[in-house]
Image (cartoon, rainbow, N blue to C red):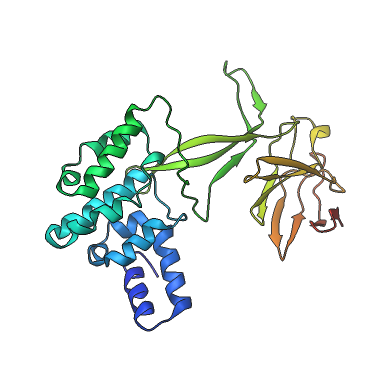
Amino acid sequence: MDETSCLDILALAEAYSLEDLGRRAEDYVLAHFQRVADGEKFKDLPFVQLQRLLERDVLNADSELAVFRAVVNWVEIDKDQRLSHLSRLMQSVRFALMRPEELQEVQDCKLLLRSSGGKTALETVKNLLHADRRTSDCKPRTPNQVLVLIGGDCVNENFERREPNLCLWFAQHFMRGEGLIRTIEWRPLAHLSEPPRFRHCVCVLNNTLYILGGRKYYGALDILKTALRFDPAQGRWEHLPDMSRPRDYFAAVCHRGKVFVLGGNCDDVNCLDSVECYTPEDNTWR
């Protein structure tokens, strides 16, 4: 399945009530929405399917402006037949998630002046642009996969030395660049609890981040065996029992409800051939 075939597969699945296939096709469209929207097949997407896609929280796009542009392009393919759908489609665009410069582009869109629903959208945009403080209960889109950066080391402001840091960032927007290049807008999500760490491992189990081992500084005695986890939904850190051995440069994986750590370095001289397993229900390593 790819962006050229997913809409055909979705239509086939709905025509023959193939629920599992339809679910997988729709998930693909949602995960690759912008590339699908740029394709030829998108212009033939029925209104009902498009509206259903726009209402999904997991729709993945660089920004909500990209969603708005997709709707405008879809309507402009056949204005006579589709302009009547503009009002309902605009209700599914989450304008409160847009930055001021993106809202300005929406305000400049002449298509919105051609229907009552479009004018309502313009009024919403106007209010957002002129509000002293843009607060809203608008639910953010939450793609199934999110890119995060945790800890690491970096050069200090004076470029004098490298320092470990405590930052946890997530990719809020992926902006298009040339070819396959993407510019990423990063947003701080939280801070690691002390100490800072780098050369650690991170894995995800049940939507919880597990941060394991690594180093707090550059000496052989600075390798860590500590472990912690972070619940993004609650913004809460929790310290876990220590691993049996300090490790950096190792591997970690979540499998069947458990966290496994494999190999790594323990003292800058010796490499480990051991494997440890953490069981969340028991809160123990073995």
Q: Residue placed farthest to the top in the image?
A: 158
Image location of residue 59, percent across then percent down:
42, 55
Image location of residue 219, percent across then percent down:
78, 30
Q: Between 30 and 92, which is closer to the camera in this rendering?
A: 92
Q: Residue placed farthest to the left in the image?
A: 80
* 69 in relation to 6, above or below: above
Q: Residue placed farthest to the bottom in the image?
A: 16
Q: Residue at x 33, y 66 (%)?
A: 49
* 119 in relation to 160, above or below: below
Position of residue 77 in the picture relative to residue 161 (left or right): left
Image location of residue 220, percent across then percent down:
81, 34
The N terminus sits in image quarter: bottom left
Q: Between 17 and 36, which is closer to the camera in this rendering?
A: 17
Q: Between 94 and 253, which is closer to the camera in this rendering?
A: 94
* 12 in relation to 202, above or below: below
Q: Residue at x 27, y 38 (%)?
A: 123
Q: Residue at x 70, y 59 (%)?
A: 254
**Count of marks, rendered view:** 0
Position of residue 74 in the picture relative to residue 133 (left or right): left
The C terminus sits in image quarter: bottom right
Image location of residue 84, percent across then percent down:
19, 58
* 59 in relation to 100, above or below: below
